[in-house]
Amino acid sequence: MLESSSVQPQVSVSGALERVMESSQRVLLARMELLRIEAEEDISRALLGALVVGSGALLLAGGWLAMTALAVYLLRDLFSFALGLTVAAIANGMAGLVLVYYGVRSLRRIRLMQPDDGERKAS
C-alpha cells in the first residue's frame, strides 16, 4: 500500500524555469507599478510645492513694493518724489545684488552625487 504523502509529483526543469520566469515577470511589473505610483506622488508634491512657493513669492513681492512705496512717501518731506524713487531703487538694487551674490556663492558649494556614489557610501 502506497501512502499519498510519500508520493511527490515530478517537477520538470522546464516547468520550474517557466514558473520562475513568470514570478520574475510579476515582481518586475509590480516594481514598475510602484515606481510609477511613487513618481506620480513626487511630481504632484513638487507641483504643489512650486505653486505654494510661487504664491508666497508673489505676496512677498507685493509686500516689498508696498514697503518701498511707504518709504518713498515718508521721505517726501526730505527729498523730491523723483529723488525718493531713486533712493528706493538704489536701495532695492543693492539689496538684490547682495542676495544674488550670496545665492550664487551657496550654489557653487553644492556637490552633485554621481549615480554610483550612493552605492559606495551605503556599503
Image (tube, rainbow, N blue to C red):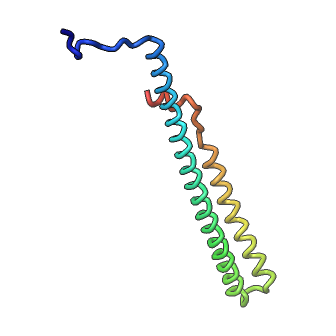
The furthest residue to the top: 1
Query: Is residue 41 shown left or right of residue 6?
Result: right
- Which residue is more in the foreground, 83 or 40? 40
* x and y, in percent, of residue 40 in the image: 57, 49
| Residue 79: percent from left, percent from top | 76, 85
Q: x, y percentage for residue 109?
A: 60, 43
State which quadrant residue 5 falls in: top left
Q: Please tell me which residue is depicted at 63% across the width and 76% down the height of the picture.
A: 63
Q: In the rendered image, which quarter contains the N terminus?
A: top left
Judge left or right: residue 96 versus residue 24. Answer: right
Q: Residue at x 21, y 10 (%)?
A: 2
In the image, taking residue 17 as reference, residue 103 lies left or right, namely right
Residue in view at x 69 percent, y 63 percent = 96
User: Quick one: which residue is furthest to the front in this view?
Assistant: 1
Q: Residue furthest right?
A: 82
Q: Quadrant of residue 123?
A: top left
Q: Which percent across, then down, holds residue 46?
A: 58, 54
Q: How many marks?
A: 0
